[in-house]
Amino acid sequence: MMNKVRVRKRINKKNIPLIFARGVMVKYFHASWPIWIDFRITYRCNLRCRYCDMPSSKIGEMSTDQAKMVIDKINAPGRVILLTGGEPLVRKDIGEIVDYFAFHSDCEVRFNTNLVLLKKRYDEIKNCDGFFFSLDGTKKTHEENKGEGSFKGVEEGLEILHSEKRGKISMTVITGNTTLDDIKFVLDTCAKYEIVPAFQMVRHYELSKESREINPEMDNAVKIFEYLLEERKKGFIMMNSRKGLIGQIKLARALANTNGDFKASCYSGKLLCTVDSDGIVGLCFSRPRHTNSLNLTQEQVTFNDALKALHTIKPHTKRCPTCTCMAPIEFSLCNLLNVDVLLDNYHSEKEFQRLEKAYTARNHP
């Protein structure tokens, strides 16, 4: 494994026009060029969250060499990869995979972790381009969702990342036990540790275990998102745009009064997609795997082949009923005609990148 520290910038001034141009092609000319890819490197996990049952999955796991081949296929300037799981830190080769992204690709690679194992393995993955993690509220609420002792890992992990001046994005899942005090605690924690927060209602997908049983009361969800909207208007930077928060409020109201079939566009397979732990390219982890999907661990399959196969699964404008996932919502809203969404997303990304630049500058004066 390489001991050097990454100095290249994945997202730089040259990439911004490239991302912009490709966004135009996707939005208005029906092209397909994912800017964001969720790369689930494993289903294994050291926690057993009550809204997730991924560790029970029978889906296979690619080898280190296969992972490198997949990285080569998805590699492109201006592309962001979220390396996720399960818990990626349970893989013994995770440092080698991160370093391959860092030194052999033009992609920006961000690392998603529950932070529990970060204290032991941070040095192995420090060449990533920032961190995602989950924080569901106070210690009581967080551990009700993720298990006893999980909050200590968050505290220890945040101390490391804060001292290193790393870019950090937290995801708060709003469930039936989420209170306004939890949300205020998350915002206070984010202010203390320089974190950009994100919020969404609990997501339902194939391996979501008890998620439907722990749905939030929709009246409470509306109050939470209305509070977050006011904080956003006051200047608190978060991944959710103002329009995205308004959309969550409308969705919660729709769920409270109808069957929840809230109509909105979706750009999965176009602006974003997934790569599963066995190499299958999919639209979204919230959707079941499809027989038309192709596997990137097969040498003859290119990424373009896999994207074309996705187009046979659904029209790009159709959205799954009651989708609550924050990232697809923001991607669907972020178009050239919506200045507010563009500005909100620009400010949240700028704050994240500010910390990563500080980290790079400190390590390479």
Image (cartoon, rainbow, N blue to C red):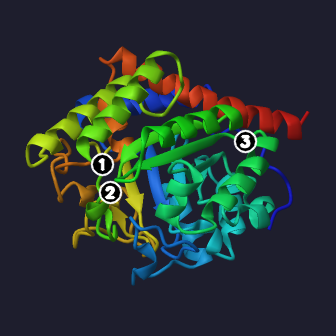
Q: Which residue is mark 3?
A: 166
* Label 3: how many Cα within 10 Å (few below 14, some 14–19, many 20+): many
Q: Secondary structure at mark 1?
A: loop
* Label 2: how many Cα within 10 Å (few below 14, some 14–19, many 20+): many
Asked if the residue at tag 2 contacts the one at tag 3, i.e. Cβ–Cβ closer than 8 Å, the answer is no
* Label 1: how many Cα within 10 Å (few below 14, some 14–19, many 20+): many
Residue 154 location, quadrant: bottom right
Residue 256 visible: yes
Across and down, in percent, residue 105 comes to 62, 52
Q: Is residue 8 left or right of residue 199?
A: right
Q: Rounded to the nearest whole Å, what is the CA distance between mark 3 and mark 1?
A: 29 Å
Residue at the spot x=47%, y=62% of the render? 145
Q: Secondary structure at mark 3?
A: loop
Across and down, in percent, residue 3 comes to 86, 60
Q: Earlier in the sequence, mark 3 or mark 1?
A: 3
Q: Amino acid at mark 3?
A: Arg
Q: Rounded to the nearest whole Å, what is the CA distance between mark 2 and mark 1?
A: 6 Å
Residue 278 visible: no
- For this rendering, which residue is in front, 362 or 291? 362
Asked if the residue at tag 1 contacts the one at tag 2, i.e. Cβ–Cβ closer than 8 Å, the answer is yes
Q: Which residue is mark 2?
A: 284
Residue at the spot x=52%, y=17% of the render? 235
In what quadrant of the picture does the C terminus appear? top right
Q: Rounded to the nearest whole Å, what is the CA distance between mark 3 and mark 2?
A: 28 Å
Which of the labelled discs sits on residue 268, or is there none? 1
- For this rendering, which residue is in front, 78 or 181? 181
Q: Secondary structure at mark 2?
A: loop
Q: Earlier in the sequence, mark 2 or mark 1?
A: 1
